[in-house]
Amino acid sequence: IPVHMIETINKMNRISRQILQETGQEPDPATLAARMEMPEEKIRKILKISKEPISMETPIGDDDDSHLGDFIEDQSTLAPSDAATFASLRDVTKEVLDTLTPREAKVLRMRFGIEMSTDHPLEEVGKQFDVTRERIRQIEAKALRKLRHPSRSERLKSFLDQEG
């Protein structure tokens, strides 16, 4: 898109927003044409050009060493800082769970889906250990009480502070 056309598109967008604020409605091409003192047909062409897709390979800047696609965030991947935080949380969680008895740690891992693809109901965890669901609930409650002790919980608190 030529520079003069970009300026015209920006002007049209600015006027369009102004009309929207004044009337509460999106302006039609005739209204824009009157405001911009241009033929309606030219406004229609400008609208069409402004809506056309633009290549991700479009050069940005004077040196042509950057492209538009370089500046678009990839929403499907974690930001490096988030990935590092997640890895650290996983490591600290493993270390804290390893301070519990193997049985308590496995119950919590199964109940909350830690290091697993899904969490498991009391009944299912009970079958794994060949005990009742009530006994699993008791083991879970005892393990969670242990995790609330400052010697263990302090290591995880720093991750909560980062959220809010």
Image (cartoon, rainbow, N blue to C red):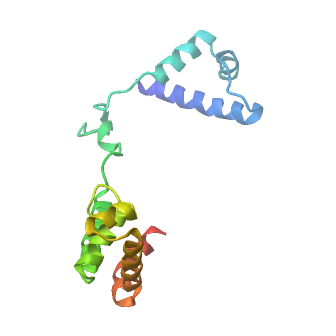
- Say if 48 sits above or below 112 in the image: above
Measured as percent of width and height from the top left, residue 134 is found at 42, 72
User: Could you say which quadrant of the image residue 83 lies in?
Assistant: bottom left
* Viewer-proximal residue among 104 and 69: 104
- Say if 33 sits above or below 79 in the image: above
What's the residue at 65%, 22% (across, down)?
Answer: 36
Measured as percent of width and height from the top left, residue 93 is found at 29, 74
Measured as percent of width and height from the top left, residue 127 is found at 30, 64
What's the residue at 35%, 59% (across, down)?
Answer: 119
* Viewer-proximal residue among 136 and 54: 136
User: Could you say which quadrant of the image residue 20 lies in?
Assistant: top right
- Say if 43 sits above or below 81 in the image: above
* Viewer-proximal residue among 81 and 149: 149
What's the residue at 59%, 9% (across, down)?
Answer: 41
What's the residue at 74%, 33% (across, down)?
Answer: 24
Observer able to see residue 89: no
Q: Quadrant of the N terminus?
A: top left
Measured as percent of width and height from the top left, residue 56 is found at 31, 32
Q: Decide if residue 126 is on the left or right side of residue 161.
A: left
Observer able to see residue 75: yes
